[in-house]
Structure formats: structure tokens, C-alpha cells
Image (spheres, grey):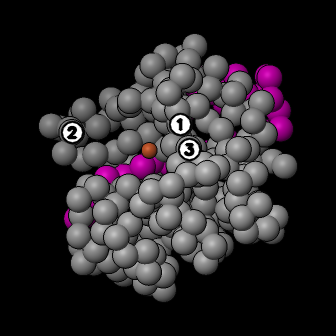
């Protein structure tokens, strides 16, 4: 099975992901070994962390350089691996403006945007933010939904977000065999009702959060069947990144 990862911090020397080129290459090796053949790099974009447009430009130059290095490495070693670029955007009121100013990126130039929120956000604010993005012609992919208390305590809210038009991403590392507790229960609820659209790695480091999907794929396959596992570990992400729709 070939997997597609649409949320990771593998680019080196950019954010809190890979610390240098060496670690980035090691992470690409791990991803390939795990069966990942499509990657969309999503460096963080938190507008409040910058104090000037110049700082944002330097950040984006580092991203471009690192992306070029990754492409060069992969084209020589793994020609069947496909790389794309996006951003993990911390929600702020004018994401459309940040995109049109090239401060951050949608997913591979499509209308899909990977968005994260403060983990303490209320459901009212999350729904309002998702609607605002949709009104502006953007499709939000809500990153690592298992982190938000407002969703964990009421998993039915995932369906409400999906009815609006938002898409749901879960981190592979949170899907574990024999897991107990609130988050595990939340994830089982979401997976069994096909409310998850993507499993991605959100990989940051070789040792602490490597880019691996295969183990989560096996668990989802057992729990929900092979068709759904294929969709959320590969097909949905491929559709977005290659065709700009789902
Ligand atoms: Fe992330």
C-alpha cells in the first residue's frame, strides 16, 4: 500500500520540525520505508510570531530552499515519491489575505487549507472560523482534531463540521491498538462513522514523531475495513493534491 501524508514538518531548518538537512533526509528515508509515496510538507505559519513582512519573507525563503533540497534528494533516491508544499496555518481572521500576500500556502495551490486552532477553542468559534473560510472559497482541513477539548467532549460535532464542508485530519501516532481513555474513544467513534478524511503523520522529528502511517493503517483496516483505510491513508489526500478536489 502506498500512503500519502498531507501534514508533516519534515523540511529542515524551518520550524520546530527537522533540525537540519541531515534529519530531513533521515525522515524522508523513514517515510519511504514506511510506504509513504506522496508528501505535502506543511511548515507552521503563525502570523503572530512575525514582527514584519521582511521576517515572513525570510521564513518563506528558508522554506523554498529546504523544499528544493528535499526535491533534489528524492528525485535521485526515490523517483516514485511525489512532493508538494502547503502550510499548517494557525487560524487568524484574514487567512485569505495571508494567502494572497504569499505569507503562507494552501495545499499545493488548491483551495484546501490545513488549519489548526488553539486547543482551548470553543466549538462556536471553530464552527464560525470554518464557515468564514468556506465563505471565502477555501476548504478547511482541520488538523489533528483529537487535540480539541470541544470536540472530544462531544464527538457528534465532527459531523456538524463536515456538514458545513470542513474536512477532518487525525494524527497517525494517536491511533493505537488497545488504547483506552477519552481520546481513544473519540477516535474510535470518529473512525467507525467515517468522519475522518485523512490520517497524516504530523511528523516533527526522527526520534519523537517519525513520519509513519503503516501501523495506523493496519488498525483502521481492522476496525473499519480496507476501503475506508485506503481512502483516509492515501486516496483522499492524493485527490486533493493532484486534482484539487475530493
Ligand atoms: Fe503540525
Label at residue 86? none
Position of residue 3 in the picture relative to residue 53 (left or right): right
Q: Nearer the viewer, residue 153 or 14?
A: 153
- Identity of the residue drawn at 50% across and 64% down: 185
Pointer 3 or 2: first along the chain = 2
Of all residues, the one furthest to the left in this rendering is 51
Pointer 1 or 3: first along the chain = 3
Q: Can residue 82 be spotted in the picture?
A: no
For residue 181: magenta?
no
Q: Is residue 189 above or below residue 40?
A: below
Q: Does the CB distance between marks 3 and 2 fall below 8 Å?
A: no
For residue 82: magenta?
yes
Ligand 1 positioned in quadrant: top left
Mark 1 is surrounded, within 10 Å at the Cα level, by few (under 14), some (14 to 19) or many (20 or more) other residues, namely many
Residue that label 2 marks: 49
Between disc 1 and disc 3, the foreground one is 3
Residue 107: x, y in percent?
53, 55
Q: Nearer the viewer, residue 215 or 236?
A: 215
Between disc 2 and disc 1, the foreground one is 1
Q: Quadrant of residue 46?
A: top left
Q: Label 3 to label 2, Cα distance in Å? A: 27 Å
Amino acid at each position: 500500500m502506498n500512503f500519502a501524508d498531507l501534514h508533516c514538518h519534515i523540511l529542515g531548518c524551518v520550524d520546530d520540525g527537522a533540525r537540519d538537512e541531515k534529519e530531513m533526509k533521515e525522515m524522508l528515508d523513514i517515510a519511504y520505508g514506511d510506504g509513504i509515496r506522496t508528501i505535502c510538507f506543511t511548515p507552521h505559519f503563525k502570523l503572530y510570531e512575525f514582527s514584519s513582512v521582511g521576517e515572513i519573507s525570510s521564513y518563506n525563503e528558508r522554506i523554498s530552499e529546504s523544499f528544493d533540497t528535499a526535491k533534489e534528494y528524492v528525485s535521485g533516491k526515490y523517483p516514485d515519491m511525489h512532493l508538494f508544499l502547503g502550510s499548517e496555518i494557525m487560524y487568524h481572521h484574514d487567512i485569505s489575505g495571508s494567502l494572497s500576500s504569499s505569507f503562507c500556502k494552501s495545499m499545493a495551490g488548491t483551495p484546501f487549507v490545513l488549519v489548526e486552532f488553539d486547543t482551548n477553542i470553543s466549538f462556536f468559534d471553530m464552527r464560525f472560523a470554518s464557515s468564514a473560510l468556506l465563505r471565502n472559497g477555501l476548504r478547511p482541513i482541520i488538523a489533528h482534531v483529537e487535540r480539541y477539548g470541544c470536540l472530544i467532549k462531544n464527538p457528534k460535532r465532527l459531523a456538524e463540521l463536515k456538514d458545513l464542508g470542513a474536512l477532518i485530519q487525525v494524527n497517525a501516532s494517536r491511533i493505537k491498538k488497545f488504547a483506552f481513555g477519552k481520546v481513544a474513544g473519540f477516535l474510535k467513534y470518529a473512525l467507525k462513522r467515517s468522519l475522518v478524511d485523512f490520517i497524516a503523520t504530523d511528523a516533527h522529528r526522527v526520534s519523537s514523531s517519525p513520519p509513519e502511517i503503516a501501523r495506523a493503517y493496519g488498525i483502521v483496516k481492522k476496525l473499519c475495513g480496507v476501503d475506508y483505510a485506503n481512502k483516509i491513508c492515501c486516496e483522499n489526500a492524493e485527490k486533493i493534491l493532484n486534482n484539487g478536489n475530493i
